[in-house]
């Protein structure tokens, strides 16, 4: 006997649990945030700062109590895991586990939430040299919240405004760190 079960046919077009995948991502509301910032520093200097997970605390609102719990102390690389705690809403402490899923030195990295408050968090960071010797930094975040319609209501009432304040703070902090120097 060849090891195959009698009467078992594997379809080339079907994927196990494909309907679960489709339901999960078709029914949830996906939101998108895009920010673009010009930084008066070389791509290499920007990469040096942004590829170090320890610098995330520097560009995060103080009232979020962001604390790295564990990472290997290395610059970002594919497969790196970073765990931290923060208080994003109402002072409630949450754990967050991030995985760096793609990384090309001096060009881009992608982080995704493996565990945390979002149903989906996918954050792409791009660094492009500009003719003046600076860097164009683009962030693209796709996120979704749990709890169906309640998540949509929470996004409308609280989450989108909180994320706006987080990214506004980050923008201003980067301006202070990189663009206020003469």
Image: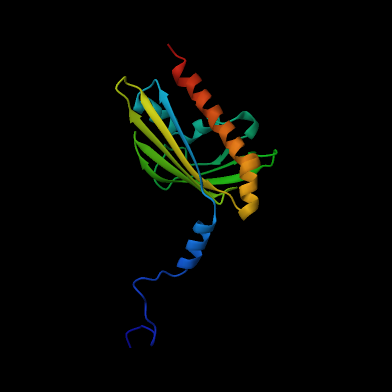
Q: Residue furthest left?
A: 131
Q: Is residue 134 left or right of residue 65?
A: left
- Quarter of the image where the C terminus is located: top left
Scheme by which the image is coloured: rainbow
Percent from the top left, x then y, of residue 85? Answer: 61, 41
Q: Is residue 2 left or right of residue 100?
A: left
Q: Position of residue 8 (x, y in %)?
A: 39, 83
Q: In front: 117, or 4?
A: 117
Q: Is residue 97 above or below residue 180?
A: below
In the picture, which quadrant includes the N terminus?
Answer: bottom left
Q: Quadrant of residue 124?
A: top left
Q: Report which quarter residue 148 is drawn in.
A: bottom right
Q: Name the residue rendered at 44%, 36% in the picture.
A: 139
State how many labels appear. 0
Residue 66 picture location, percent across and down: 60, 35
Q: Residue at x 35, y 27 (%)?
A: 43
Q: Furthest-top residue in view?
A: 182
Q: Residue at x 65, y 31 (%)?
A: 63
Q: Is residue 168 above or below residue 182?
A: below
Residue at left offset 40%, top offset 30%: 137
Residue 82's x, y, as percent? 51, 43
């Amino acid at each position: 006997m060849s090891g195959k079960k009698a009467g078992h046919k594997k379809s080339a077009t079907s994927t196990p649990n494909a309907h679960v995948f489709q339901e999960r991502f078709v029914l949830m509301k996906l939101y998108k945030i895009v920010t673009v910032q010009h930084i008066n520093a070389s791509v290499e200097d920007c990469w040096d700062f942004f590829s170090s997970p320890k610098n995330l605390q520097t560009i995060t609102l103080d009232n979020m109590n962001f604390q790295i719990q564990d990472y290997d102390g290395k610059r970002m690389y594919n497969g790196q895991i970073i765990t931290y705690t923060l208080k994003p809403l109402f002072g409630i402490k949450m754990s967050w586990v991030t995985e760096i899923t793609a990384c090309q030195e001096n060009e881009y990295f992608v982080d995704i939430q493996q565990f945390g408050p979002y149903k989906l968090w996918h954050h792409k960071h791009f660094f492009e040299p500009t003719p003046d010797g600076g860097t164009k930094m683009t962030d693209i975040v796709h996120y979704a919240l749990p709890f169906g319609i309640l998540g949509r209501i929470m996004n409308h009432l609280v989450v989108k405004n909180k994320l706006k304040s987080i990214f506004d703070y980050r923008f201003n902090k980067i301006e202070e760190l990189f663009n206020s120097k003469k």
